Image (tube, grey):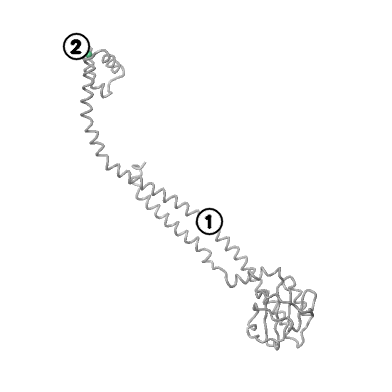
Amino acid sequence: MKNECYIVRDLLPSYIDELCSEESARFVEQHIDTCEECSQLLHQMRVEFDTQEQPEISARLEQKKPFQKIAHFFNAQKNFTRFFSISFWVALIITIGFFIHALNVLSNLNDIREEAQVVEQQKQDIMDKAFAILSSKEIVDETALQAVYREYSEQLQHLAVFSTKNIDDVTRLQNGPTTTFPIDYSQAVLVIGENGKISESIVPDIYDIGTIAMANNQWVVQYEYKKSYLKTVENAHQIKHYAPTNWTIFQLPIVFAIITVFILGACLFQKRITKPVESILD
Ligand SMILES: [Zn+2]
């Protein structure tokens, strides 16, 4: 054994642990290449070192296992939190969309409601004006009635007056302007149209929403709307009888808002649970 061998053998433990300097390591390697004995010793020491270390490593891995399981669990929790927050944003966007839609519907509905009020008021006005003329005289004042027709010529097709003597069932017409199945114009005392008094026979429009009648004890007044005005009248009729309530309009957005709040609650709860272990999760 050479002198160098003693130095190398002193260095071997730190060489195996990779603790010696680069120069010493190179010195050991150069020596090992040339010295069979030291080379064998290094090999032997390495085998020993491994058999010592191995059980320790496996024990350490064994210890880690439960923590790995916990980490697995918390990672699942983390995904859960992510799922909740994505769900929250999706639900929020849907809710906002529904609310915008509902507000649009409400705004349109309010426009139609206003229009309907105008139509209803107009029905009353036309009847009031016609009956004001009729009640003052025994004979129908054609000129005055024509003036009423002209005032509403944008909306009216015909304006007719009947004597209650010619009509069977007038009681249902005595409560105010009513949509009605048209009374046969051939029984009328007077019918006024675009060009004044109409003498020839009229085929009535049998669409009952388009015809309005009202009666007092002596007279029945009936008028028919122009086709061009029917859409407005129809909308007014719809809104009066079948209008959705504000609750119906906002039902869906409110339901979605509640769902969104629930998801937010779940999301915050989940975040609170995972907060203390957040550093472990990353
Ligand atoms: Zn040697």
Q: How many marks can you see?
A: 2
Instruction: State the SS at label 2.
Output: loop
Q: Horizontal placement of 113 versus 200: left or right?
A: left
Asked if the residue under mark 2 is in contact with the one under mark 1, i.e. CB atoms within 8 Å, the reply is: no
Q: Residue 280 placed where, x, y %?
A: 33, 42
The response on whether ligand 1 sits within 8 Å of label 2 is yes
Q: Residue 145 placed where, x, y %?
A: 76, 79
Residue at the disc numbered 2: 1
Q: Is residue 232 above or below residue 168?
A: above
| Amino acid, disc 2 | Met
Picture quadrant where residue 231 is located:
bottom right
Instruction: State the SS at label 1.
Output: helix
**Quadrant in the picture for the N terminus:** top left
In the drawing, what numbered circle is on residue 52? Answer: none
| Amino acid, disc 1 | Gly
Residue at the disc numbered 1: 97
Q: Residue 25 placed where, x, y %?
A: 29, 18
Q: Nearer the viewer, mark 1 or mark 2?
A: 2
**Quadrant in the picture for the C terminus:** top left
Q: Is residue 15 above or below residue 263?
A: above
Please state which of residues 14 and 227 is positioned toward the viewer in this rendering: 227
Picture quadrant where residue 229 is located:
bottom right
Extreme-left residue of the structure: 1
Please state which of residues 197 and 182 is positioned toward the viewer in this rendering: 182
Label 1 packing within 10 angstroms: few (<14), some (14-19), many (20+): few
Label 2 packing within 10 angstroms: few (<14), some (14-19), many (20+): few
